[in-house]
Amino acid sequence: MSEQRVSNERKKELEELDPFQENLLKAITYVKEYKKQLILIAGAIVLVAVVFAGIMYSFQKAENNAGILVSQVLTKYAEANDPDKGYLETKNDFQIIFTDYTNTTAGKLAKVRFAKICYDASKFDQSYQYYKESLEIFKNEALMENFLLASLGHVSLARKEFEDAEKYFLQIEKGKIDLLKDEARFALAMLDEAADNTVGSKKLYEKIVAEYEGSMYKPIAKSKIDEIK
């Protein structure tokens, strides 16, 4: 009699669902009820994944194509072995890169390279334009920003726009990044010297000598200090 009672109680326990089983049954019921909608959702997720993969492949392909094209154009420029001839032979190729691959890393860097090509061919207005556009592109990359500010400073000097040149070099001189700071200080010292500000130029030359042991500008700065004395 006792065994029968235990058996009945155990049977009752077994008939009662534990929380896990109950939730599992609810999930199965939900799936059956909304099977069509779930299939559509799953299909949409797969479609998004496929589209995303396609976009990434397209970007990578564009990046590869841009890199190859830029390399070919730079080879053509080097083979010209003359700044003016190289500029004339590659300017149309660079325009194609800027139009077709503007959003690729290779395309963005090509703009920097072409700005230098323009500078070497004495196309200073064009050089300034492309360096300015590049500065906007790379404005959040500190090292690249310093390089472009220095380039704009030198182009401004070539254009005889001395106030603009000073503005660009000062941004480097007052910045937190040391890259090209010795060059910026040297350019600013030369500008001060040209404006007969010998006190200002001497201070900048002295900074170069004191702070930049391996700088290519150090020997020149030393001789300039001696001249000012």
Image: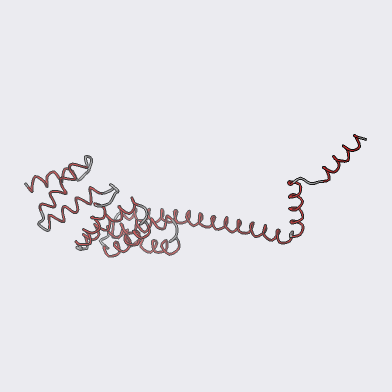
Residue at (18%, 45%) from the top-left corner? 207
Q: Would residue 70 appear left or right of 132 to someone viewing this image?
A: right
In the foreground, 172 or 86 = 172
Q: Residue 28, how many percent across, how many down?
A: 76, 53
In the foreground, 131 or 211 = 211
Residue placed furthest toward the right:
1
- Asked if residue 7 is positioned above or below residue 184 in the image, the reply reads above
In the foreground, 188 or 102 = 188
Q: Residue 23, how many percent across, how many down?
A: 73, 50
Q: Quadrant of residue 145?
A: bottom left
Residue placed furthest toward the front:
2
In the foreground, 17 or 199 = 17
- Asked if residue 68 is positioned above or below residue 212 in the image, the reply reads below
Q: Would residue 86 appear left or right of 4 to someone viewing this image?
A: left
Q: Residue 127, how many percent across, how many down?
A: 29, 61
Q: Would residue 18 appear left or right of 90 to someone viewing this image?
A: right
Q: Quadrant of the N terminus?
A: top right
Q: Residue 222, how many percent across, how many down?
A: 13, 43
Residue placed furthest toward the left:
229
- Tally of marks: 0
Q: Quadrant of residue 55?
A: bottom right
Q: Would residue 77 appear left or right of 10 to someone viewing this image?
A: left
Q: How is the image coloured?
A: secondary structure
Residue at (26%, 49%) from the top-left corner? 180
